[in-house]
Image (spheres, helix red, strand yellow):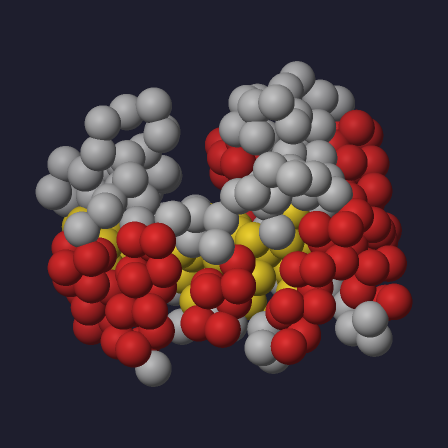
Amino acid sequence: MKLNCDLGESFGPWKMGIDEAIMPLIDSANIACGFHASDPVIMQHTVKLALKHGVSIGAHPGYPDLVGFGRRSIACTPKEIEAFLIYQCGALDAICKAQGTKIEYVKPHGALYNDMMKNDTVFMALVQGLSKYRKDLKLMILSTNRNIHFKELAKPYGIKLIYEVFADRAYTKEGLLVPRTENGSVIESTDEILERIEMLQKQKKLKTICGKKIELQADSMCVHGDNQKAVELVRALREYIG
């Protein structure tokens, strides 16, 4: 199981996250592409940092929502979503190319990620966009009891999926992420998170916010690195997973 983290989310002089401390501890970095956060200089710096530490690079596209940090759903047509994806992946890929590398996968950000998991039309717009841009790019999605469903939708387009779980986010009984607007949506206790990961590794299950256990495939685990406590958590997970 790999560790991934959303990085490169600063904007101009505004600082977000502790990328320099997080990058050496993870396997793959989901780098913001300018729509919900970041700018060309930040993107360039983050790619350079990933290369320095041998970290795989993934594009982290979102809705065009800098003010809301991409966490607000926007009513878009499938063609718009497809264009947003290609535009953002192309921008990051160009910056990667200039440094002798390329993006390896795509993980939608925030509301776009959540909408993808709830609405097959949004999911298909992303899959079709990837198939037109680069079929070798994998799409990272939330691991749920509908993994086979999404795999079958993506298969005709030649897009492979990466199934992701969240170490520090609470799950609903349906296997989706508890909205950040609700109490208990983010888990802050390192001990509790390590207990969850141990259960995931040994039983392939996670406990939901209501106490129910759900079975999940875990190819990659997302951790958030936007504060000093998060750095300690990522370091503990790195030591635990190895």
Task: Tell me what residue is drawn at x 28 percent, y 35 percent.
Answer: 185
x, y percent for residue 44 = 76, 58
Q: Quadrant of residue 10?
A: top right
Seen in the picture, residue 23 relative to 121 is either above or below; the reply is: below
Measuring from the top left, give residue 152's x and y in whole percent: 59, 53
Q: How many marks?
A: 0
x and y percent of residue 117 in the render? 50, 38
Tell whether 54 sits left or right of 181: right
Q: Can the viewer see residue 154 in this picture?
A: no
Q: Is residue 58 left or right of residue 188?
A: right
Q: Quadrant of the C terminus?
A: bottom left
Work out which quarter of the rendered image holds the N terminus and state it.
bottom left
Q: Residue furthest left?
A: 211
In the rendered image, residue 67, in percent from the top left (x then y), is placed at 61, 22
Which residue: 53% across, 52% down? 6
- Nearest the viewer among 194 and 98 is 98
Residue 144 left/right relative to 24: left
Please say whether residue 179 is visible from this viewpoint.
yes
Q: Residue at x 14, y 59 (%)?
A: 191
Residue furthest to the top in view is 75
Instruction: Say if 107 sits above or below 57 in the image.
Output: above
Q: Nearer the viewer, residue 209 or 145?
A: 209
Relative depth, front residue between 171 and 195: 195
Please, is residue 145 above or below residue 23 in the view? above
Q: Residue at x 75, y 23 (%)?
A: 77
Q: Is residue 80 above or below residue 127?
A: above
51 or 116: nearer the viewer = 51
